[in-house]
Amino acid sequence: MDWRVLLGCISLWAGLVLAEVGSFDECKQYFCKEFQPFGFQISHWAQICQRYNRQYHFATLYDKANRIPYWSAYILSVANCPDQTSRKRQWFVEPQVSPSTENESTLSEKELRFSQAINEDYEDTSYTRGHLNPYSFQCDDSSTATFTLTNAVPMEPYFNQVRWHKLEKNLKRQLIENCISKRGTAYLVTGAVPSDNEKIPKTDEDKVSVPSHIWTAVSCDHPDNNRKFSFAFLAENKAASRLQLMSVEQLNSELSRLYSRTIKIFSNDLPKEFRSTSFNGSGAPKSPRWFETELDKFMKEMIRWDRLIWQLTDLKLLVLVTNIPLICDGMGFDLVQKII
């Protein structure tokens, strides 16, 4: 074997993560009511129980044809652990997604690229690797486990590092306050709609689809039916994208239109309307549509942030927007906010 090929294999294998591929039997606890999202399975897909350090951490349905995940299903689990002060830099690949029957250690880079994305696919492109299951929603090994390319899709940099990042931060805070602290369990499914036209890298035959839309469905499950709620977000994968808040039922309709087939994220027994976990003395919800209020605040903050970014860019005080991830990644993002 050529020494350069061997060195490349060693480098690639430094980012291996072994998952359970073939069924969701070992990770069905990450589905609300054990209901698996319906309508995505057509062909060239892989059911993955994402495993790291001998534990299962979340579930992913992977589209091997487009080389991106359809969705990842997970539980918000950061309420009882310290804040994540740093993020992992290494991204894993998943050899068991490959259709090859050979031993994992003999798989070549070419065989891996046939059915999944690798780190090189993102090099010299205008897209960043965007988590579906956010690393900030998990603790310790569960956080590390999110850094697999089977949990990542190409995202427009400003959308990923500013819009979606701030949405995740706001959503995490709201779910801890309104679900987990009330002894509920927050189930989430985050997915991506593959684009027929935009793919990376431009010079490669085995290209990774760039999603046209990113979405998240949320369900707070609770023994008390009055404390349950569900809602969803949908956004285009663009810098100027406007986030849409909707019911899960509305998201099902939108995804059914985008996919041209019937889609269902959660089971039928979920609450169909937005519902608050804030109660008055009589036990009735105080604000039945508090999510809309929170989104309105969030969108006003985003408009303010957009204006500041464009102003600083025009004044040459900030690098081009496509380079924003270099300065607002992790702790750097908070630093930029404080400076502004």
Image (cartoon, rainbow, N blue to C red):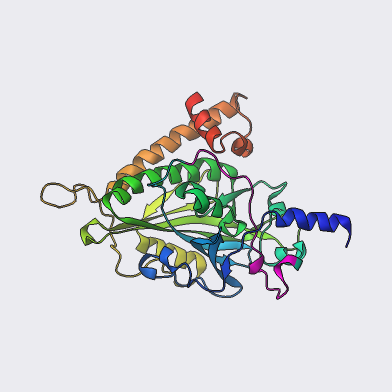
Rendering coords of residue 15 (x, y %): 67, 54
Residue 340 showing in the rendered view: no
Residue 144, position in %: x, y? Answer: 55, 51
- Residue 196 image position (x, y, % from top left): 62, 63
At 63% from the left and 51% from the top, the residue drawn is: 91
Against 226, is 127 above or below? above
**Picture quarter containing residue 232?**
bottom left
Q: Main secondary structure of the magenta part?
A: loop
- Can residue 296 be seen in the rendering of this structure? yes
Is 94 in the magenta? yes
Residue at 35 percent of width and 39 percent of height: 297
Image position, residue 335 (x, y; %): 52, 29
Magenta extent: 84-105
The residue that appears at 59% across and 43% down in the rendered structure is: 157
Q: Is residue 171 left or right of residue 106?
A: left
Q: Quick one: 316 or 7, which is closer to the camera?
A: 7
Counting labels gives 0
Quarter that holds the N terminus:
bottom right
Look at the picture and state if 317 lies above or below 333: above
